[in-house]
Amino acid sequence: MKPYAEVIGDPIAHSKSPLIHGFWLDALGIDAEYRRAHVRPEELAGYFESRRADPAWRGCNITIPHKQAALDYVEDRGGVRESIGAVNTVIRGEDGALIGTNTDAGGFYAPIAGLDLEGRHAVVIGAGGAARAILFALSRLGIGRVTIQNRNVLKAAALLSSFGIKGDAVPLGSPLPPAALLVNASALGMAGQPPLDIDLSPLPEDAVVYDAVYVPLETQLLAQARARGLDTVDGLEMLIGQAALAFELFFGAEPPRDRDDALRALLMS
Ligand code: NAP
């Protein structure tokens, strides 16, 4: 039987992962599949039990609402529960064990790997799952200080202290500090959600604005940043980055990142 990996979630129809992995499998001529599987919360235990017994299954990506619950069914060899607190990728180890990991932090980091953020100030908007992965990455980069803006300020303060990062938690709409990096990791600006209303004028000229939202791709935040001449990173870069790390784990091959332009065109069509 053909080897396969898949993405699981509830709902799952919206997931772009099959398009991304399918594109890379085709490009590399790998005879394998990447599917989507609708798995409801009450089906999660049964899902892992059946896949554990399926030799063709290489692993899965995990999306809402299973990223935390999946930790109960997999081995956490990298200490993900204590750090990011959620898994987005499960693979089968050589010994047959199901191993959970998280590629969101690496996917966030890849597009800004060239920035020197050591000792600098960053602002993160949001305190949910994406923000956790981003704060983990920022803590590893030696960030000096992080200001989190969030609707629920207490949740943001708890998140900051769980990573031992210096900084502060403030309400949405607070004036920005002169930070080197601004990241939107909230649902604001996403299609169907309220817009992100923000004044970028306090940011210095070399600041980078990064939006994790990828529907729409050109968010109001990114348009505003470009209008000010700031460098920007869009949500597809993070999405493709986290998928690339997972692809290598599933199929043992590096995806052809020189084809990113064609992949981005496919994802936007
Ligand atoms: P989540 O865990 O549900 O967190 C949602 C965040 O948005 C929380 O901070 C929440 O504030 C805030 N929020 C939601 N609705 C709001 C509203 N009406 N007004 C103000 N704040 C609101 O979601 P997530 O998984 O972190 O995802 C957050 C965003 O990141 C989404 O747009 C998602 O598409 C994007 N994302 C992108 C990637 C990528 O690869 N590019 C990966 C993961 C996520 P409270 O804490 O106050 O509730």
Image: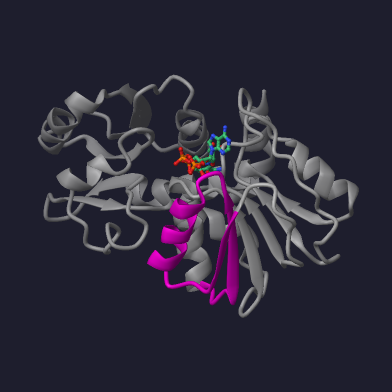
Rendered-image quadrant of the C terminus: top right
Q: Is residue 38 above or below residue 259?
A: above
On screen, residue 170 versus residue 28, left or right, reads right
| Magenta-drawn stretch contains 20 | no
| Nearest to the observer: residue 86 or residue 58 | 86
Which residue is rendered at x = 64% and y = 60% of the image? 123
Please say whether residue 18 is visible from this viewpoint.
yes
Q: Is residue 137 left or right of residue 83?
A: right
User: 192 or 39: nearer the eye?
Assistant: 192
Q: Residue at x 28, y 46 (%)?
A: 90
Please state the horizontal and vertical placement of residue 189, each as a whole percent of the image.
66, 34
Q: Is residue 256 visible?
A: no
Name which quarter of the figure residue 267 lies in: top right
Residue 89 falls left or right of residue 71 = right
Q: Which residues are magenta?
A: 141-170
Relative to 164, 125 lies left or right? right
Residue at 74% x, 40% y is 197
Q: State the image quarter where residue 32 is shown.
A: top left
Residue 181: % across, % down: 69, 62
The answer to whether 48 is drawn above or below residue 228 in the figure is above
Please say whether residue 160 is one of the residues in the magenta stretch: yes
Q: Residue at x 69, y 47 (%)?
A: 173
